[in-house]
Amino acid sequence: MPAWIVVGTQWGDEGKGKATDLLADDVDYVVRYQGGNNAGHTIIVGDTTLKLHLVPSGVMYSDVTPVIGDGVVLDPGVLLDELDALVEQGLDVSNLKISGNAHLIMPYHRELDRVTERYLGRQKLGTTKRGIGPTYADKAARVGMRVQDLYDMKIFRQKLDVVLKEKNATLSRVYNRLPMKAADIETEYAVYAERLRPYIADTMSLLHDALEDGRNVLLEGAQGTLLDLDHGTYPFVTSSNPVAGGALTGAGLGPKHVDRVIGITKAYVTRVGSGPFPTELHDAIGERMTDVGQEYGTTTGRRRRVGWFDAVVARYAARVNGLTEHFLTKLDVLSAFGTLKVCRAYRYQGEEYDHFPPHQSIFHHATPVYEEVSGWNDDITGVTQFAQLPKEAQAYVDRLEELAGVPIRWVSVGPKRSQTLERAA
Ligand code: GDP
Ligand code: IMO
Ligand code: MG
């Protein structure tokens, strides 16, 4: 049985958590393949609201095995707190599996994330300050600490001593911070090691065995296509590969295992942190969109920047991920507006761009070419069939589909699992 990939098509917060949770009904494994606790996914089922950062969405289903794959960076203290909170909410998390290849976020990574952002001043990236970038940087520099190192404390300490020498020099001499003590870190992480021990598994083999047994595997991306390290709006990106290709390296699977790539796409666009955003709204309409859409970060509580739907971005995401279909979210939020705008192309120095411009300067200075579409001004949160939506809402979805070039298979009209309309294939 093949695997499915769920990927954000914009700058994150598209509603991947809700979509994954819904799709998890048909799968046996839900795998996080990259990122760390920079992610924030809100899932609402009945009266229960879950806020997840590291634990894969789909944890609500007792017959789904949640997996934290090789490509994730893991802050053990944060993960254990999250697991405790889920248990308190009555969930069984005992079947969570964690790859020994995942990299550990260490205290110096968090500290470096904070101080480098401060150092950048107005040029800052607006990171989540969770230590994500420094952890991936160490992974690439081959001085990272991995989950499996927790189970050989001698090696853990040896590696830590080497890396801490350089980190402490940087922290104290460049950033004027106090150095950290290896012994303190070792003691702290030894406690985490024992608590995490039951969850550690050979997740790559586990997933291959599952696929060979005919099980369904869903690979859940965090962040979004435009935050991708290689394909996003560099340097205003995260330090991993949320795109579909990243799902393969992050889980240890090959292209032949995947048959569906589902793009999670908001009916408008949001962005947290710095960086270019052509359709961004700075006016009262934007204020309204933030309020109606409740666009505040799940992880940092920051107000999200908002803007009209961007079809150039949607087409780009369709290509770079090889999307087979879209899951459109938050259509209900647009009920608040009379006339809607959709960006179908960019204009730069008199030229029109239908596709994502190849040079950052064009993207930074691109102005959107909009078409106007009628709104519907009607509450659609109780609608249960696509055909029951007001005709303007149906036309909006049809137009987005046409512009993006990939079928919109699901339309979400509210945060709950039940508020999802499935369209015919
Ligand atoms: P993720 O990071 O992609 O999982 O998205 P977040 O969970 O950070 O942000 C999406 C927010 O929108 C969450 O608070 C969801 O509960 C909410 N949400 C998801 N789908 C819908 C929808 O169709 N309508 C509304 N109004 N809210 C939604
Ligand atoms: P989910 O999974 C939205 C953004 C940060 C910042 C940039 C780099 O909930 O969609 P980082 O801490 O990763 O080094 O920050 O990426 N960012 C997100 N924005 N949703 C997320 O995750 C994000 N994860 C990181 O705001 O601009
Ligand atoms: Mg989020």
Image: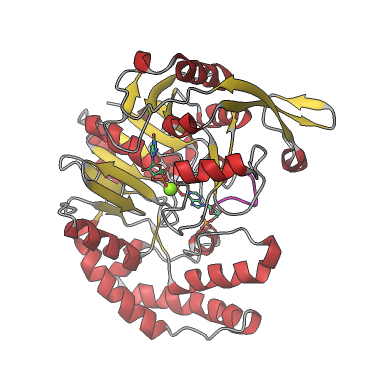
Residue 366 on image: x %, y %: 74, 36
Residue 184, image x and y in percent?
37, 84
In this rendering, would 185 be left or right of 60?
Answer: right
Q: In this image, 194 relative to 337: left or right?
A: left
| Residue closer to the observer: 205 or 294 | 294
Magenta region includes residue 398? no
Q: Looking at the image, which residue is at 32% across and 43% down?
A: 31
Q: Is residue 394 above or below residue 251?
A: above
Query: Can you give x and y, in whole percent of width and height, for residue 48 in the image?
Result: 22, 47
Q: Nearer the viewer, residue 192 or 122?
A: 122
> Is 236 situated above or below 400?
below
Q: Quadrant of ligand 1?
A: top left
Q: Position of residue 40 (x, y in %)?
A: 40, 51
Task: Examine the structure image and report whether residue 235 is included in the region drawn in magenta.
Answer: yes
Residue 107, by quadrant, is: bottom left
Stretch in magenta: 232-239
Which image quarter holds the C terminus? top left
